[in-house]
Image (spheres, grey):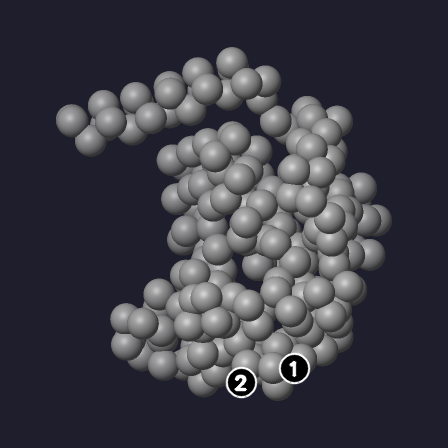
């Protein structure tokens, strides 16, 4: 299963991506986590990334692709799939990602679009800032990020809808309800293995990976 998670900040991409990873064995690839790790490393690339993320602006495409593409290739090779969280965020990124995916045989199967009212998103992000100590989650930066999303990322909804691969879900309700609808939407497209098959497939991949390490 190769899935893209699309949503404004705070709508639950990370939460539901990790759940999908647990359910399917596909790798969870968070663009935000990869970029924050690069910043924390203090590398030259990380310093370039920080100059944008500290303001709440989108990171330029050349920096994004240099970090993400190797991770996506490795995920498709090692687990057979991926849950891509937080990328693409602009139409140029989406078009380039589709081209690269077609060339490498790792095109996404579905796009999960999560939504929630803006004030709910702001409230969640402020709570996350208090809980996790995220310096980029100030009220001004949050408002700016949501405005950037509306301008740059929202057009992707129409693009993926026209391709017939969009699954739209509201997250302004109990998490269990969101997951039930998400599971139903994916199963309707033949993308989630039955529990027994899924467990066996994950076990087989884990065994193969361990055997490779032993060699």
Residue ID at (64%, 28%): 191
Q: Quadrant of the C terminus?
A: top left
Q: Is residue 200 visible?
A: yes
Location of residue 87 in the rendering, given as x and y in whole percent from the top left corner = 58, 59
Position above or below: 120 against 70: below
From this viewpoint, which residue is outermost toward the left?
215
Q: Tell which of 152 and 120 is nearer to you.
A: 120
Instruction: Tell me whether circle 1 and circle 2 mark residues in contact (CB < 8 Å).
Output: yes
Quadrant in the picture for residue 27: top left
* Residue named by callout 1: 144
**Number of residues whose C-alpha sits closer than 10 Å to that of mark 2, classed few (under 14), some (14–19) or many (20 or more):** some
Q: Quadrant of the N terminus?
A: top right
Location of residue 72 in the rendering, given as x and y in whole percent from the top left corner = 46, 48
Residue ID at (51%, 21%): 198
Position above or below: 55 against 123: below
* Residue named by callout 2: 55
Q: Is residue 100 visible?
A: no
Residue ID at (46%, 58%): 68
Position above or below: 105 against 118: above
SS type, badge 1: helix
Q: Which mark is residue 121?
A: none
* Mark 1 or mark 2: whose residue is earlier in sequence: 2
Location of residue 166 in the rendering, given as x and y in whole percent from the top left corner = 76, 45
């Amino acid at each position: 299963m190769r899935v893209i998670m699309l949503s404004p900040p705070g709508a639950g991409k990370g939460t539901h991506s990790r759940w999908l990873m647990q359910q399917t064995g596909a790798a969870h690839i968070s663009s935000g986590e990869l970029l924050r790790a690069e910043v924390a490393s203090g590398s030259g690339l990380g310093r370039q990334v920080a100059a944008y993320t500290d303001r709440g602006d989108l990171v330029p495409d050349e920096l994004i692709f240099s970090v993400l593409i190797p991770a996506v290739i490795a995920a498709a090779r090692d687990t057979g799939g991926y849950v891509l969280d937080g990328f693409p965020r602009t139409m140029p990124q989406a078009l380039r990602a589709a081209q690269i995916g077609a060339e490498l045989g790792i095109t996404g199967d579905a796009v999960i679009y999560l939504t929630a009212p803006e004030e709910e998103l702001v409230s969640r992000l402020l709570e996350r800032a208090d809980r996790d100590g995220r310096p980029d989650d100030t009220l001004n930066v949050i408002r700016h990020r949501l405005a950037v999303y509306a301008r740059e990322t929202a057009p992707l909804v129409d693009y993926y809808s026209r391709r017939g691969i969009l699954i739209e879900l509201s997250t302004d309700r109990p998490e269990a309800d969101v997951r039930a609808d998400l599971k139903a939407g994916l199963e309707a497209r033949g993308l989630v293995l039955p529990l027994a098959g899924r467990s066996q497939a994950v076990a087989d991949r884990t065994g193969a990976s361990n055997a490779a390490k032993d060699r």
